[in-house]
Amino acid sequence: MSTPMAAAERRRTRQLLLAMITRLHFYVGLFVGPFLLIAALSGIAYALTPQLEQWVYHDALTTQSKGEAQPLARQITAAQAAAGISQAPAAVRPAPAAGQTTRVMFDDPSVGEFQQRALFIDPVTLAVRGDMPAYGTSGSLPLRTTISQFHRSLLLGQPGRIYSELAASWLWLLALGGVVLWWQRRGARRAPAASPQRRRQRHATLGIVAALGLVFFSATGLTWSKWAGGNIAELRHAWGWGTPSVSTTLKGQDAAAADPHAEHHHAAGGMGMTSSGVTGADFDRALAAARHAGLMAGKIELQPPPAADRAWKVREIGREWPTEVDQVALDPHSFAVLDRTDFSTFPLAAKLTRWGIDLHMGVLFGLPNQLVLVAVAGSLATLICWGYRMWWQRRPASGTRAAPQTLSALFAQLGWGPRLGVLLVALALGLALPVMGASLVLFVVIDWLRWRLSSPASVASTA
């Protein structure tokens, strides 16, 4: 049976823990706030890139020509002639609808890492409508690529990814901490309009409205991060939550039978062949085989075998709702289906991952998806600016020496059981989210120094 003394101790522990959450919420807002602000503003710009791309690259993406589309072989030949490239494409994305262009992509060392040179071909007239780099599996064009890289790494490459991982690692905890603080103060009387308390109430209310979106941003953003993302990938693999993909590896007799042009490899330079003997006409055969296999999405990508022991890979690339990402692997000789994956058979975790990423990128539900992303990111930017304003207005007046409020002083007042619990939670988060762990150590060091350098008589407030 609980004694009055035990109840008082539990109440005191709750007050100390709440004060620690308040102090940590302040530290994260103060030190991580600039990184979150950059991520929010660049995220708004990225959410608007589908419309920006259509405007900036309108000539390359669209055509006014009318009539029946030419075979892919002829479109590829036109792209090879314009680019001065004899090798077969690394991938082809046929025009998804009338009035749009076919994208023929080549491996080219002159473009950046993870990029391909894309030529945009009018499928009716075979005119070249554009020639520019396309990035990664998404095929994003230079404008979106630049905004994406800034959002992801400040255009600093791998070192710059620390910024985005730092922001994503703390964002969910910042949001949930704000929810806890709001819940504890939800019964407070409405303050006068111009008072500091009213500003804090507005800050808390907006945070509650945006909290779910902020946690979603953090969770999905971490999947792209370097260290935490690696841990998440290992966890998904261990639990069988990986995204299914077709196998393009040929085995035994299939590999030997799949290379009927082997004797012509050295003489194929002027015929648009890869090292595995692929011709332009093979792209038409692969497209027909994929359609026959049920890949009927308008947005589709054909990838020829990169080597003699590999199969064709044809995949749907429609990320909008309903999601169309089925894949097939095709025999390079007979174009029979060797392997396939269908989104309808994906495990639920793989589906949620796919939907979560596409929601984060603003493509799953089109314009409504984009508007929600802009609203949530705008709320985050507003919260950060309000937070800095409240901090500036509540700073100690010049010449005063107030006792510092520190995590260290609050931690020292906890019992041994709660201390151990706090340490274990901090250790677990630090191991799972290494950038968070490293920054938390920095916060604690700064906090401990403020505590030790303060007056011995000073005691941190627990309010």
Image (cartoon, rainbow, N blue to C red):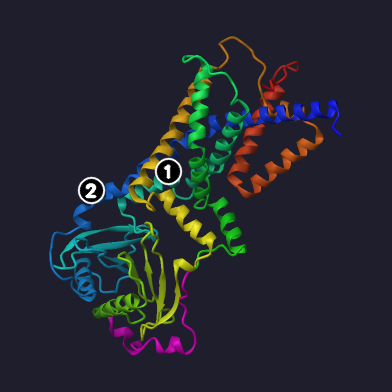
Disc ID at residue 55: 2
Name the spot of residue 407 as percent of width and height, x first.
68, 29
Q: Residue at x 43, y 37 (%)?
A: 38
Name the spot of residue 154 as percent of width and height, x first.
42, 43
Q: Which quadrant is the C terminus positioned in?
A: top right
- Decide which of 452, 431 is in the foreground and name it: 431
Q: Is residue 42 above or below residue 273?
A: above
Q: Is residue 215 above or below residue 383?
A: below
Name the spot of residue 317 as percent of width and height, x first.
36, 63
Label 1 crowd (10 A; few <14 / some 14-19 / many >=20)? many
Local secondary structure at mark 2? helix
Local secondary structure at mark 1? loop
Q: Which quadrant is the N terminus positioned in?
A: top right
Q: Residue at x 31, y 52 (%)?
A: 142
Q: Amino acid at mark 1?
A: Leu
Label 2 crowd (10 A; few <14 / some 14-19 / many >=20)? few
Q: Amino acid at mark 2?
A: Trp
Left or right of 442 on screen, residue 265: left
Disc ID at residue 154: 1
Q: Which residues are magenta?
A: 245-268
Left or right of 82 on screen, residue 165: right
